[in-house]
Image: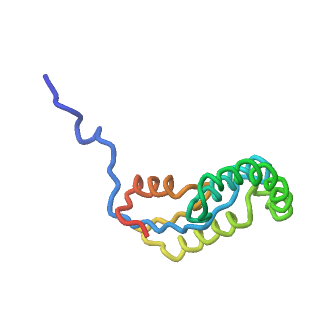
Amino acid sequence: MITLGKTTSDHPKVFFGKVGVLIINLGTPNNYSWLGIRNYLKEFLSDTRVIETNKVFWFIILNLIILNFRPHKTARNYKKIWIEKLNMSPLKYFTELQKEKLEKKLVKKNILVDYAMRYGNPSIKKKIYKLKNKGCENII
């Protein structure tokens, strides 16, 4: 007997009909190490909407001066406020709390709530894909 394709029971479930609510915050480094801060600053300060100046001039200033000297001082300040027990910055911690509280308010099955950061992690792009894969046809 010849079969053309899989039976309906073999087909993966397709999710649809949901609405995604994505809370977006500015961003935070993954950790307060020199490299963690440097990576965050590089992403943030490389955005031409944040720094509007000559690109060549800014590239030199950013990569030769700022990204070599600023992460050390910034890391010391982040270490003072870092939530060690959870290994996260206060911004990420409170953003997660906002997400959880909003989820409790929007308890309908067809509404999914998540959060992302404009700079750093979790990225907006990854969270949009995640919501779409869970069946969100509209994301606000």
Which image quarter: residue 80? bottom right
Q: Dividing the image into 4 quarters, which one contains the C terminus? A: bottom left
In the shown orientation, is residue 18 left or right of residue 102? left
Front residue of 133/63: it is 63
Location of residue 37 in the rendering, given as x and y in whole percent from the top left corner: 74, 53
Residue at 33 percent of width and 58 percent of height: 16
Q: On the image, which quarter does residue 97 sit in?
A: bottom right
The residue furthest left is 1
Left or right: 15, with 85 as reference point: left
Q: Residue furthest bottom?
A: 105
Question: Farthest residue toward the top?
Answer: 1
Q: Nearer the viewer, residue 58 or 22?
A: 58
Q: Residue at x 49, y 55 (%)?
A: 125
For this rendering, which residue is in front, 73 or 82?
Answer: 73
Query: Left or right: where does residue 127 sit relative to residue 17?
Result: right
Left/right of residue 64 with respect to residue 127 in the rendered view: right
Residue 50: x percent and y percent?
A: 60, 65
Q: What residue is rendered at 67% in x and 52% in y?
A: 42
Nearer to me, 9 or 79: 79
Quadrant containing the N terminus is: top left
Q: Position of residue 105 (x, y in %)?
A: 52, 77
User: Total marks drawn?
Assistant: 0
**Residue 138 in the image, given as x and y percentages of width and height:** 37, 66
Query: What colouring style does the render use?
Result: rainbow
